Amino acid sequence: MPSLIVADSGPLIAFALIGQLDLLNELFDEVIITESVKDETTSDASLRGARAISNQIRMGKITVTNDVKSSLYEKAVESLDIGEAESISLASRLGCRVFIDEKKGRTFAKKNHLAVVGTLGLLIKAKELGYIGQIEPLITRLESCGYRYSDKLVRAALKAAGE
């Protein structure tokens, strides 16, 4: 069975900013986003990461779908933004992981029995599989782009990656 992942905006942008979008295709057979996530990430070409994400979509490395509405979506959109709610709904329908960083969205997904993974988790997995040599420089680049992780989370990620 092919491995799928549904990506939310935040981690997709993070991977674009550190030049690692191709890692997603190394780790998964198919990367899927919703139309809302596409709009959030690419509607303005001046947005950080927009061009890289648009190129991945154009090259067929990221699949876009708008088939996301469900009762889970209706429940999720009460407390989450549309992109997160759609991503969670789609991942539930497809029976795959959701690639999401925002704490509220992760908590909602877990409460609804979805497997979640975030930016740092996928960087750790990419290192374990030999696609990257170290995660620390990538975390530093993310932080220089404005991403904020607690010291505790960074230490745990570095430990899990053997760094």
Image: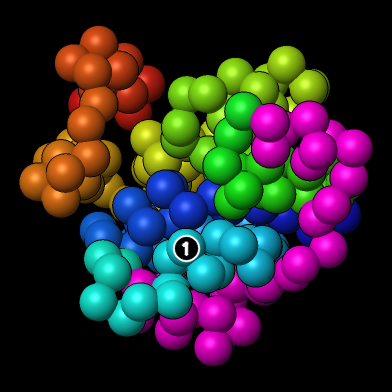
Extreme-top residue of the structure: 152
In the image, residue 30 sits, relative to residue 115, either above or below, namely below
Judge whether 12 appears above or below 41 on screen: above
Q: Is 89 on the left or on the right of 38, as rendered?
A: right
Q: Which residue is nearer to you in this view: 73 or 106?
A: 73
Q: Residue furthest front?
A: 78
Residue at the spot 42% in from the left edge and 48% down from the top edge: 10
Residue 107 at x, y = what percent?
60, 19
What residue range appears in magenta?
A: 50-78
Decide if residue 19 is in sight here: no
Q: Is residue 63 above or below residue 141?
A: below
Q: Is residue 71 left or right of residue 13?
A: right
Does residue 149 belong to the magenta stretch?
no
Q: Which residue is mark 1?
A: 40
Tell me if residue 53 is in the magenta stretch.
yes
Return the x and y of residue 7 as percentages of the image width and height. Answer: 58, 52
Q: Quadrant of residue 30?
A: bottom right
Question: Going by the image, does 93 lie left or right of 147?
Answer: right
Residue 73 visible here: yes
Residue 77 x/y as whole percent:
69, 37
Task: Please name the amino acid that badge 1 sits on.
Answer: Glu
Could you tell me which residue is drawn at 54 percent across and 88 percent down? Answer: 58
Across the whole image, how many numbered discs are drawn on residues? 1
The C terminus lies in which quarter of the figure?
top left
> Which residue is at 25% across, 58% downward?
18
Q: Quadrant of the N terminus?
A: bottom right
For disc 1, the neighbor class at 10 Å (few under 14, some 14 to 19, many from 20) is: some
Residue occupying the far left of the picture: 144
Report the coloring of the rendering: rainbow
SS type, badge 1: helix
